[in-house]
Image (tube, rainbow, N blue to C red):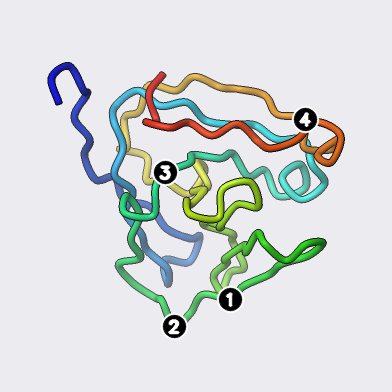
Amino acid sequence: MAGTPEKSWRSGGCHCGAVRFEVNVTDAVVVISCNCSLCAKTGFIHLVVDEADFRVTQGEDNIGEYSFHTHTARHRSCRTCHVTTHHTMRSRPDGISVNLRCLDGDANLQLRFQEFDGASWDEDGDMPTTAANQA
C-alpha cells in the first residue's frame, strides 16, 4: 500500500534475559499510559500490535501468566525475574500489548503518549487501540 510507513522488528526482553521477544512496528508509534491499579503499580506502558507483529524468540517455556477480573486479559511475565513483558488485552483479545519499557535501548522509536483512564475502566469503555501503530 502506497504511503504506508514501513515496519521493522525491534527486540526486547525481561530483566534477567530469560524471555526475549520481537515486535514489528513503524518508527513512529502511539503508546498508551494507563492509570489502572496494575499498570500504575508495574509501570507498564502499552505498545499495542496485531498478534502477527509479535513473536517470542526465547524463553517461551519460562513465561508465566496472570489474569484477574474477567480473565480475558492475560498478563505474561518471566518466571525468573517476574517482569511483565506483554499481555493479551481485555479490549482487544486478538492483539498484543507489549511493555514499552521492555524494549531494548536501541529501538529508536518516535513516541506519542496517549493517556487512558483505566482506573474508571467499566465507566469509560475500552482502551484505545492504535490500529496501525502510527503517530
Instruction: Report crowding for label 4: few under 14, some 14 to 19, many 20 or more residues within 10 A (C-alpha).
Output: some
- x and y percentages locating residue 10 in the rendered image: 29, 45
Q: Are marks 2 and 4 in contact (CB under 8 Å)?
A: no
Q: Residue at x 56, y 40 (%)?
A: 46
Please tell me how crowded label 3 is: few (under 14), some (14-19), or many (20+) other residues with Cα within 10 Å. many
Q: Nearer the N terminus, badge 4 or badge 1? A: 1
Along the line of sight, the residue nearer the viewer: 131 or 17: 131
Q: Which residue is mark 4?
A: 117
What is the x, y in percent for residue 58?
Answer: 33, 71
> Where is 65 relative to 100, above or below?
below
Q: CA distance from mark 3 to mark 1?
A: 20 Å
Q: What residue would you read off at disc 1?
A: 64
Q: Earlier in the sequence, mark 3 or mark 2?
A: 3
Distance from disc 1 to disc 2, alpha carbons, whole Å, reads 8 Å
Task: Say which residue label 2 marks.
Answer: 61
Which label sits in the foreground, 3 or 2?
Answer: 3
Which amino acid, by three-letter code, is at mark 1?
Gly
Kindly identify the amino acid type of the residue bearing the numbered disc 2: Asp
Residue type indicated by callout 3: Val
Left or right of 122? Residue 12 is left
**Residue 49, label in figure:** 3
